[in-house]
Amino acid sequence: VAPLPAGRYSDSAGGFCYQESAQLGAATRNRWVTSGDTVELVEESLDVNLLNNAVRLRIQGCPFLPGGIHLCEVQSHLVVLLLTAQTVHRLLLPHPARLYRSELITESQVQSVFTDISKIHIRDPSNYYVIPSVPGLAPNSVASAAWLSSEGEALFALPSASGGIFVLKLPPPDVQGSVSVVELKQSSVVQRFLTGWMPTAIRGDGGPSDVPVSLSVHCLDHDAVLFALCQDHKLRMWSYKDQMCLMVADLLEFMPVSRDLRLAAGTGHRLRLAFSQSLGLYLGVYMHAPKRGQFCVFQLVTTESNRYSLDHISSLFSSQETLVDFALTSAEIWALWHNEENQTVVKYINFEQNVAGQWNQVFVQPLPEEEVTVRQDQDPRIFSQGTERHMDLTWDELRKEVTLAVENEFQGSVTEYECSPEEFWQLQVEFWSKFYACCLQYQEALSRPLALHLNPYTSMVCLLKKGSMSFLVPCSLVDHLYLLSNEHLLTEDDAAIFEDLEMSRDVVCLVQCLRLIGESISMEMAFIMEMACSRLQPPEKAAEQILEDLIANDTENVMEDIHSKLQEIRNPIHAIGLLIREMDYETDAEMERGESPHLALRMSLSQLFGSTTAGNVVCGGVAKICTVRFLLCRDLLILQQLLLRLGDPVSAAPGCHAPGFGNPVGFCWESNLQHLSVLELADTTALTPHKLVSGPQTIVELFFQEVARKHIISRLFLQPNTSLAETSLNWPHLITSIVADFLPLLWPSNPSFLFPECLMGSCQYTQLQEYIRLLQPWCHVNMGSCCFMMGRCYLVMGEGHKALDCFCQAASEVGREEFLDRLIQPEEGEVVSTPRLQYYNKVLRLLEMLGLPELVIELATLAIMESADDWRSQVQTCIFKHHLDLGHNSEAYVALTQNPDPGRQLDCLRQLVVVLCERSQLQDLVEFPYVNLHNEVVGIIESHARAVDLMTHNYYELLYAFHVYRHNYRKAGTVMFEYGMRLGREVRTLRGLQKQGNCFLAAINCLRLIRPEYAWIVQPASGAVYERPGASPKRSHDGECMAVPTTHQIEILELEDLERECLLARIRLTLVEHDVSAAAVAGNSTPEETVSLLVRAGLFDSAITLCQTFKLPLTPIFEGLTFKCIKLQLGGEAAQAKAWDWLAANQLSALVTTKESR
């Protein structure tokens, strides 16, 4: 590894975790990436979403040293120590414990510690210092270290140009003082002193210098110990307080060396420390040599005389890949390499237990394919939304900008105005492929790992990249075996798989067969299986077709290899069954819940894994598991088809019988395969427009954040007698438990129905429909709940009748499924009935809320067959209401008559009358038969007639028509007579008197239509006829309600009486037509009063007729006429002229003309 010149350092990255990150409510970490003179600081949390959590800091002209960012915690601050090639800096940020002063965080998002970083004065002299030219920074080393002393001083250790180390010390932030420089260099006296116990081989004088290539610091109470791995392959230990070299060890003694290696400068060596309270301090050293490397692990040992030595624990040899970074714990080494193909390789090893030195493989997500095949029938503009969240544009905006940019580039490069469709398509493919290549380069640059970060408090391991951070999640046994490379699978310890060694070997051989099949399947073959699952076709048919293609294209004798491996499996049925059980996530019951813990624990748990980052991590792990197991089931189903093809005992594997093997296992296969097909669908992008970039990007993330997380955390932590001190968060155990509990919640064959509920609650109707569609052929759990959800989707899509069919299918499962049982829980005050009826009631209310009366009627008609009388009346009322709303008058009447509850029936009848009257559909109202409801409908119309305004409503005329239609002329006449009497009393206008006359004529006509002996009507005593419902009660002078008389005097009115009333009404009308001002008095006047009014108006002719009809004396008429004549005699010409008005209103032919009168 050649040293980089100053000012041109490679990109680097690192991370920092708070000491309390292993406790609930504090799982926050910081990461940083340096590039030249710029550093990006990002704060991440798995529990809450952080605002303003990323900052980019640039110190112009001062490139950062690789690994030159160090973060330290003090009680009230987070201190960031920065080392560049020319300067050192200290930044003071608020500690999260100080930033969130409340004991618990209850919000879903909080401010980051970087929120107010812009207010910090970076060039404050007390917080930065320029590296002095003497002793100066060593030009051929990029090592550095920084720490805080117990007094709060900031110390920076750098390689000295003169050899050794020099340390810069900044005084505490609140203390005035100067910067001091201390140089740690081994003097000749010390060297002679150390010669007595140092190995002879390290005392040569002509070797490399003692410039450190890697520095690490371990803080003690009042001192700091510096470990320097130097170019001369020696490890030196310094005490900063005493400024003494406490130990020198030659590391070449622990590895095979040559003279060339001893004389070469060890510029590629790395040093890491790991401290354990129980085990002490461990040192991990990577010794770089050409074409090989070696890890050495030591434990620092202290003797009684305060002398130090190294206890060699382990030596581990690594491959030829280029080491990028490694991390050390007290039991493991994690290493990051780049191989010859420039691909990322991550491995780990337990150096205490792994005697054979076998590294464990970490499966890293590969980059996308370099080339995308575009068929002739496809549009080259294919978009796929990735997982990158750091963008300011929405997905739609980004897609539009990209399309516009590529189209502009395309238009600018095409010189010909016309081209064939094939040429145009080819040009589009060319330009979009160019854009895709640029995207790949960008993604490859940002996803290139720069460092490993290991959280010593939670055992979390992360890959730090230039543009993001990846979390390493433990792998299950099935995934581990399937993903393991062939050379590692051959060396896998059988005892580590199952206790039964023979069974372990069978499983390994079985997985090897599956690996051979999987590696032979092309993209076209894989597409066959995916489409079969998507189109609900039998997967075994697709497996059979793939097997035929494999046999036809078997140029490398893969089938023979598989056949030979099958011969090694002693019990294939048992091995396959074991593999299936390992992949099965079906549960028999709901997850148990513990008792409710105290408030502090509940509040902390409410935030645990609540951030978007945590959702991405968990759901990314679930998606990976589902993808791997889908492939595993596919290959297993193909292998089954091969075994069935090999059916005879000679060619079949030992113990394998074709018929017994095919049927039951094939059923499990198909079920598992389609389970995984559904779960793979569940990770498709949620197509919600204008979604925030920081929000959930897939429906599985949405489900985890909104629903599943609370259930999982409750099950894991809400147990009796749990305290905060007992709930430290071990990452491998916690993430494994969360994923293991999350998958059953997604698994369709489990009783839990939370996932579809979440999709429905989040309006993800398209995804929910597709999810249920994929379940229909094979999933027999929650079938009724799925039907109900599909019905809800159809309602949203406007397909009401399909929705109704689904709701009816779901009714048969009510009382058997947990979701439907929760759905029908009665609300407060609601009448409890049978579960089926309660379900129908809920659906009917849903349809009513959406305004779908036709569907309400159809469902209610079906439901009424199963209902008892009390609920049937409610359903019939519902049917009546919606028929009436739709204008189905006849159907509404039928529903009314079938209502078993008299009270509800009467209410419906009242509503029918009112609505049809408002709509003027009086013919329907009159012609309905009203079997056993005749008196009720008459009473309703009468009550409305007597309660409303006579001139705006025609209830009397309706009642008249009602009786005439049924040939009940006496009642018809009674109604019209009452109508006329009320008009005279209440409507004293010309129009009212006109209607009154018509009413009396209609009443007379009705009585004339019946035989004379029956031509009479009954009139209650005065006042009783007009006691109307709703009228205010009569009160006495002291405000008390007066008693209503219980008996009335009955008066019989015959035809002659009605004719007299009609004559009186006609004469009143004549009076009002002559003198409009008399209307207010004449409307309800008696015959005597009418005579007086007629005489005063000069209508003597009408007065005589009235007197003769009612047998009244004529004296008032002649007295009036005499009085008028006297007035004329005494009056002048004006009075005589006016007299012609009333004289004209009388019949002149009836007057006697004399000479004197002329």
Image: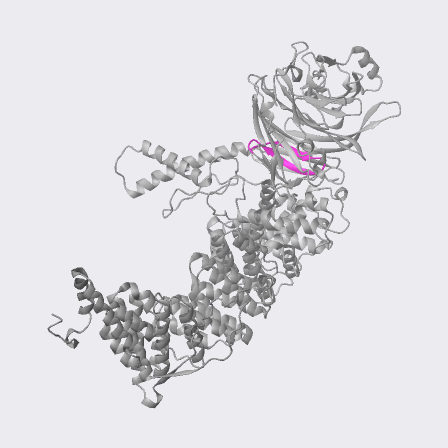
Q: Position of residue 340 (x, y in %)?
A: 57, 33
User: Residue farthest to the right?
Assistant: 304
Using the rendered image of the protein, determine whether residue 557 is visible from the camera's viewpoint. Answer: no
- In the image, residue 379 lies in the stretch drawn in magenta: no
The residue closer to the viewer here, 131 or 517, is 131
- In the image, residue 451 lies in the stretch drawn in magenta: yes
Using the rendered image of the protein, determine whether residue 324 is visible from the camera's viewpoint. Answer: yes
User: Residue farthest to the top?
Assistant: 134
Q: Position of residue 336 (x, y in %)?
A: 63, 33
Task: State how many labels appear.
Answer: 0
Residue at coordinates 25% horizontally, 77% vertically from top-left?
1104
The residue closer to the viewer here, 159 or 210, is 159
Residue at coordinates 69% horizontally, 11% vertically from top-left?
162
- The quadrant in which the N terminus is found is top right
Scheme by which the image is coloured: one colour
Q: Position of residue 556 (x, y in %)?
A: 52, 49
- The quadrant in which the C terminus is found is bottom left
Residue at coordinates 59% horizontally, 16% vertically from top-left?
6
As drawn, is 1131 to the left or to the right of 48?
left
The residue closer to the viewer here, 775 or 413, is 775
State which quadrant residue 225 falls in.
top right
**Which residues, given as a range, are shown in magenta?**
448-467
Task: Say if 284 sits above or below 900 in the image.
Answer: above
Q: Position of residue 216 (x, y in %)?
A: 71, 24
Task: Say if 634 sits above or below 147 in the image.
Answer: below
Secondary structure of the magenta portion, mostly?
Answer: strand
